[in-house]
């Protein structure tokens, strides 16, 4: 079954699970943060992350992918073991310069640096995976903006928790038509009560910055360190009078979206 949101020029989005989204854009197939492992535990440094659910679509059934948008490589909830194996079959992988230094076959984008793939311009944009100054612990992460003639401008947030970073993106890029936002108030306990992805309140603030952008929330389920549900997010958007702005995808079911 395919759900259709009535707007104008369209793109097809398939939420696979966690931060992993396949979408068609500019006659190319894109994938964000590949995570295809089944449930399990992952220890990285002092933290152990617990994966609770597997992907709605297996790596073998994803099909051909032209490019991967990898927000960062440091954390298994954004790049797990099967995800790393998947990258070997993808011609173009874009991420941070730090990831490019650690991983063969990855091209790093500085903030505001752009590359052209086919008819699509991809720009690396700022992201902050925690409170200000968190990079020595959380590492550097990135978001992406995709633009092509005749198509909606798409923002892929990556693991960004900062409203300020989104304000900078809008100031620099201009109108965003569709935003794929990592939400869920991820909190593995590293910074006390400070979340490392958008929570219900900060996601609403991002929505205000973006205006009438169609917002697709992902990365709010499947791991034990997510502290807020999508139901909670939807209530926050409803209380703010922005319920119509939020389009929650069903994992495994294609969704057709475009600018309002």
Image: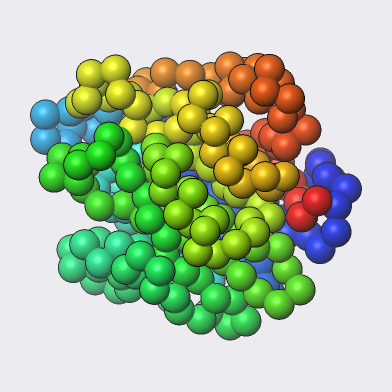
Q: Is residue 1 left or right of residue 223?
A: right
Q: What colour scheme has been applied to the protein in the rendered image? A: rainbow
Residue extending furthest front?
A: 171
Residue extending furthest right?
A: 6
Q: Position of residue 116 (x, y in %)?
A: 51, 81
Above or below, 126 against 230 in this view is below
Q: Is residue 53 left or right of residue 47?
A: right
Above or below, 153 against 166 in this view is below
Q: Position of residue 118 (x, y in %)?
A: 58, 82
Residue 9 quadrant: bottom right
Q: Residue at x 53, y 24 (%)?
A: 200
Q: Position of residue 240 (x, y in %)?
A: 67, 23
Query: Which residue is at the front of the view, 204 or 86?
Result: 204
Q: Position of residue 221 (x, y in %)?
A: 49, 27
Using the rendered image of the protein, determine whether residue 222 is visible from the camera's viewpoint: no
Q: Quadrant of the N terminus?
A: top right
Q: Residue at x 63, y 56 (%)?
A: 176
Q: Residue at x 85, y 59 (%)?
A: 8
Q: Is residue 39 left or right of residue 120?
A: left
Above or below, 233 against 6 in this view is above
Q: Residue at x 47, y 26 (%)?
A: 199
Using the rendered image of the protein, determine whether residue 205 is visible from the camera's viewpoint: yes
Number of dots carrying numbers:
0
């Amino acid at each position: 079954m395919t759900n259709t949101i009535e707007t104008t020029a369209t793109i097809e989005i398939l939420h696979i699970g966690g931060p992993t989204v396949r979408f068609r854009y500019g006659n190319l197939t894109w994938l964000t943060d590949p995570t295809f492992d089944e449930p399990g535990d992952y220890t990285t440094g002092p933290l152990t992350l617990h994966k609770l659910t597997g992907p709605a679509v297996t790596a073998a059934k994803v099909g051909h992918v032209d490019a991967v948008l990898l927000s960062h490589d440091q954390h298994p909830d954004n790049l797990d073991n099967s995800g790393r194996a998947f990258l070997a079959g993808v011609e173009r992988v874009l991420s941070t310069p730090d990831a490019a230094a650690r991983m063969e076959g990855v091209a790093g984008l500085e903030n505001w640096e752009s590359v052209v793939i086919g008819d699509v311009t991809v720009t690396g944009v700022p992201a902050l995976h925690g409170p200000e100054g968190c990079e020595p612990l959380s590492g550097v992460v990135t978001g992406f903006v995709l633009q092509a003639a005749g198509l909606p401008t798409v923002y892929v947030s990556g693991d960004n928790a900062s409203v300020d970073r989104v304000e900078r993106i809008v100031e620099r890029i201009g109108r965003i038509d569709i935003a794929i936002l990592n939400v869920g108030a991820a909190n593995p306990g590293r910074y006390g009560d400070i979340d490392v992805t958008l929570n219900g309140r900060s996601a609403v603030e991002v929505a205000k910055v973006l205006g009438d952008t169609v917002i697709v929330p992902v990365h709010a389920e499947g791991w034990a360190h997510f502290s807020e549900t999508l139901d909670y997010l939807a209530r926050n958007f409803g209380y703010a009078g922005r319920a119509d702005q939020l389009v929650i995808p069903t994992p495994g079911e294609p969704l057709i979206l475009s600018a309002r």
